Image: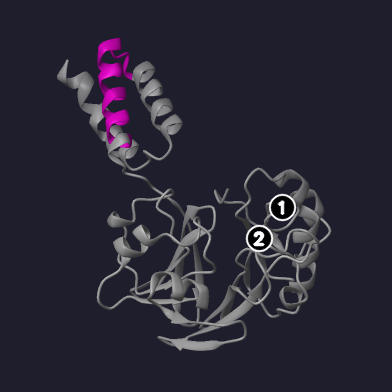
Amino acid sequence: MFRKVRPLFFWLVICCNHTDNLNFSIRLLFNLNKLYKMKKSIFFFAAIIVFALNSYGAVVYERDEFQTSAGKLVITFFGHSSFRLDINGKSIYIDPWSKLADFAHQPKADLILLTHEHYDHLDTTAISNLSNTETQLYCTASIQKMINKGLIMKNGDIKMWNGIKIEAVPAYNLTPNKEEFHPKSRDNGYILTIGDKRFYIAGDSENTPEMKAVKNIDVAFLPMNQPYTMTPEQLADAAAAIHPKILYPYHTGETDLELLKSLMLKYPNIELRIRSLK
């Protein structure tokens, strides 16, 4: 019997590294059951282990890598509008939200960028879990007033941090009767220039003149979930103006991604990347 069970442990290691995807784990175990003709009791024992590991929280998040003249940059996607940029041993977090990850078990932040004060962008628990004495936080004036910490960046401000240029871009609603969600002059998007690459993180905004004036962007994160941010048509309009090399729709909620895909066929030079950023 041990000879039958022994191969299982090799595959359990793989399952443990993919416990964010239970379907993947169970498919592996099911195929092993057929391959090794294991008894049902062994299969269910293994399945219980995988479920237990998943409950413990061993989550593997989607990641993308980019080569810059400053070094390799890795982006880890937690979901919604929350992600991390890692380069040269430094970790930059954008709008960390505890609903999406246990930030007590993530690398400490060297820098946290907050776009605005809504609960899914300003999470003091996440900030506390990610912070140590060296962590810096850049935010809007309204956030600084609310939490009594952070360096204020107003629309149009530019700061240098560890060789990275950070520009604050206005983020707001312009559709009538929706301005109250994100009023003009309050919230930020950010452009990060890292080596020879420019990353635009728009924050919660519609396709404003300021957004459409942003140029020379390699990677753009544009939001899509009316009534709070953009429709697919607005996002496609903004993308056409900015013309990034790579476009990530984020903060997408229940918006129709298939419609966006169809609209973006008009712009074959823009690579549309869909990640788990609902």
Q: Which is more toward the observer, 125 or 76?
A: 125
The residue segment tinted magenta is 36-54
Please say whether residue 15 is visible from this viewpoint.
yes
Q: With 135 as the anchor, is 6 left or right in this view?
A: left
The numbered dot on residue 181 is 2
Q: What x and y, as percent, mark residue 215?
A: 71, 80
Q: Dot 1: what SS?
A: loop
Q: Residue at x 63, y 51 (%)?
A: 252
Q: Is residue 50 magenta?
A: yes
Q: With 264 as the anchor, is 111 left or right in this view?
A: left
Please say whether residue 140 is visible from this viewpoint.
no
Q: What x and y, as percent, mark residue 78?
A: 46, 53
Q: Is residue 271 magenta?
A: no
Label 2 near label 1: C-beta < 8 Å? yes
* Amino acid bearing label 1: Pro
Q: With 209 as the anchor, is 67 left or right in this view?
A: left
Q: Residue at x 26, y 28 (%)?
A: 49
Q: Residue at x 57, y 83 (%)?
A: 154
Q: Which is more toward the observer, 18 or 177?
A: 177
Q: Which residue is mark 1?
A: 227
